[in-house]
Amino acid sequence: MSVKITIIGTGYVGLVSGACFAELGHDVICVDADQRKIDMIAEGRMPIYEPALDQLVARNVELGRLRFSNSTKDSVKGRDAVFIAVGTPSDGAGRADLRFVFAAAMEVANAIDQFTVIVTKSTVPVGTNHQVYSRVLERLGHPDAFAVASNPEFLREGAAIQDFMEPDRVVIGCENDRAKAVMERIYAPLTVKGSRLVATNIETAEMIKYAANAFLAIKVSFINEVADLCEVINANVNDVALGIGLDHRIGAAFLKTGPGWGGSCFPKDTRALLMTARDAGMPATIVQSAIEANVSRKKSMVERVRRMCGGSVAGKKIAVLGVTFKGQTDDMRESPSLDILPPLVLEGAVVEAYDPSNPHDAAALLPEVTMAESAIAAATDADLIVVLTEWMIFTTIDLAELASVMRTPALLDLRNLFDRGKAEAAGFTRYVSLGQTGESIGDLAIAEPSAAINQ
Ligand code: UDX
């Protein structure tokens, strides 16, 4: 049964969630104060880079299940649930800045005209939903007019629609039965297909979000540390990841080594969890160590580039493939490129980067880096190519063509995207990746059974 939903905030979380809720059959209004964003969407252009989002939005607008507004006041009356999906950036001390969350909550409080569930989908520190409740109650004066619920998201940029429509679980933190019934109706199209719904109290739901992201960040920092160790013991980190990931208690995901984690979530959420622990007078040494390991890893990548250039990058042209924090996104927030590329320019390198998403903020965030139109353009006359992101499109690049236009064909693969043999066959005289001094034999189980038998 269709639920009347309003989403406040049309960013990576709000716009994807709104379009997906509409796809599930609900009646959705997405609100954003920025009229330019609303206008862009009305012209069919997305304010964020998310594969297939434009078609999803267009289809549901066409079906009349999804519409957009820049007025919270006009979009909250007569709605069953209002989701707050506004940004919660880190403040200087690493705490989540909740100004936008509370401002949205008060706008809702001033406009609701029937029982409404105020759902916080933004990632907020433990205890925030109770603060939202207190502020709205103070404004409305009686507890029967509304309820609050925590409904954290687990959407990866670049895979957000899939993560929403095929969730490993939906987490609801709610202490009001009427509100819980509304949330169950909202997610019924997913739970009837077998998605698990974890219903718990509010603090637990808020904590699940932080614990999930912190654990994933720790897992990545762990495999990055293992990769460095593999380099000195003649092991191969890809095979280590394969060998441990096949253990169902570990799982294969998030075991790809790289230049360090970034984005709008891992850094912000690990810092916020640290602050929560500190405020509670509890240690968070494991999270702290993962953060420190990640900071030093990004610095160590600069040293790897220096080593590939014979000890100094002065006067060298360095071509970079990818400047976003990972592949399949245009997001540069806390991207490793922001820590790795400026020091190289300071040391006298000329850096030219190609990123398939052509991030709109690349020039502002990396003013000292030239953005190229293509990988070939960036590689022309370069002394080294550095792979910083695992864009799928990079795997179809003609390596021989890249090598042929370089001054010295050397490739530093910080995502283990390419294969040493193929790179050398394509003409690269030096190919260095992460954690792969030991040759990988790959996963024999995947090879033809006869091949394994004939070993
Ligand atoms: C993350 C969580 O995955 C998602 O559930 C949450 O809702 C938001 O934060 P996202 O920030 O889009 O999603 O990025 P993610 O795909 O998780 O990658 C985070 C960082 O870890 C990136 O810098 C990525 O390059 C890095 N990473 C990830 C690795 O280096 N290796 C891996 O195997 C996986």
Image: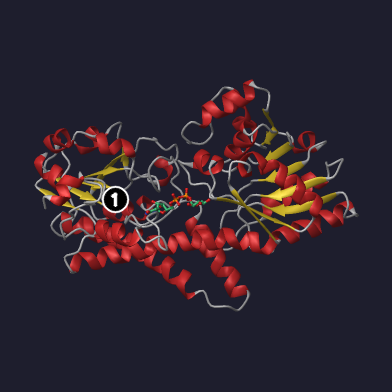
Q: Is residue 353 left or right of residue 88?
A: left
Q: Quadrant of residue 427?
A: top left
Q: How many marks?
A: 1
- Binning the other alpha carbons within 10 Å of mark 1 as few (below 14), some (14 to 19) or many (20 upward) gives many
Compared to residue 62, the image places residue 393 above or below, namely: below
| Mark 1 CB lies closer than 8 A to ligand 1 | yes
Image x and y of residue 361, in percent:
44, 40
Residue at x-position 75% and y-position 56% = 132
Quadrant containing the N terminus in the rendered view:
top right
Judge whether residue 172 can be spotted in this image: yes
Name the residue type under label 1: Arg
Compared to residue 88, the image places residue 385 above or below, namely: above
Q: Is residue 69 left or right of residue 11?
A: right
Q: Secondary structure at mark 1?
A: loop
Q: Quadrant of residue 67?
A: top right
Residue at x-position 33% and y-position 46% = 389
**Nearest the eye: 285 or 369:** 285
Image x and y of residue 133, in percent:
78, 57
Judge whether residue 93 can be spotted in this image: no
- Residue marked by disc 1: 415
